[in-house]
Image: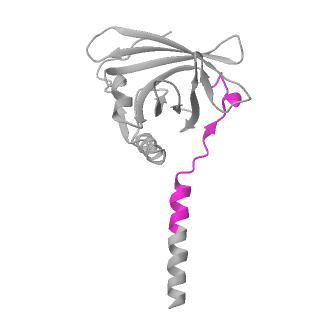
Amino acid sequence: MYQRIWSWMVYLFGLSMQALWYCDYNDKVTAGSLNKTQYSGKWYFIMMAADSESSLLKFGAVDSAIFLLTPMQDKGKLLLRGEFRLSDTPNCLPRQWIYNISNKTEEMILEGRPEQQTEIFVKDGNDYIMLLEIQDEGMEKFKRLMLYGRSPSLTDDMRRELEHRAYCLDLTAHLVLKQALPPCEIY
């Protein structure tokens, strides 16, 4: 009897540990060690997950988005320019951000928004990158996981990967960009 109880306890413990380890990823790239040349260039915004549907609202009108990541002369900065095509207009909406990177922090810090931290995860042979944006302070609080690819297409494996990681991070709302219109051009 005791042997049977003991074996069940060991079995349940094993399942619990497996569930915990299943969410353990080792693909995080620290901001200070990011190879800026390797990750420079065009990236297509494909999909995201967030902690609430309200965190996705401002992205719902976006049909497609393309970004250009460029190292700046200041070695501790990256310029990210984006062109957004909205679903209800053929026009492109330009935006740009500057990220500060340092060997002192694991995350990138968005210039002008020090309360927002961005973690970097590299996927599938550097063809995809995930950014986890977290802001716990200020007027807007959010946690969102964003998937970018070197091409605008989304593989089933990468979709499942983002959905699983979102589950592990307790991000319950998902959005895949429609991409019904061709993406904007960016140079």
Q: Quadrant of residue 159?
A: top left
Q: Is residue 129 above or below residue 74?
A: below
> Quick check: is 85 in the magenta stretch?
no
Please indicate whether residue 79 sits to the left or right of residue 47 in the image: right
Provide residue 38's location: percent of width, then percent of height.
63, 25
Front position in the image: 177 or 140: 140
Q: Does residue 128 appear in this view?
A: no
Judge by depth and name the residue closer to the eye, 133 or 66.
Answer: 133
Give the residues drawn in magenta, as a range.
15-39
Residue sticking out furthest to the left: 88
Q: Is residue 64 visible?
A: yes
Q: Position of residue 184 (x, y in %)?
A: 39, 13
**How many numbered markers are drawn?**
0
**In the displayed structure, would residue 152 be above or below residue 20?**
above
Q: Quadrant of residue 160?
A: top left
Is 186 or 9 nearer to us in this picture? Answer: 9
Q: Residue furthest bottom?
A: 1
Q: From the viewer's perspective, is residue 65 above or below residue 20?
A: above
Report the side of 88 relative to 80 (left or right): left
Residue at (55, 63) in percent of width and height: 17
Task: Report the residue at 31% width, 27% height from top.
Answer: 178
Closest to the observer: 136 or 96?
136
Q: Position of residue 85 (x, y in %)?
A: 35, 15
Query: Whole-percent x and y of residue 97?
Result: 54, 15
Judge left or right: residue 44 versus residue 24: left
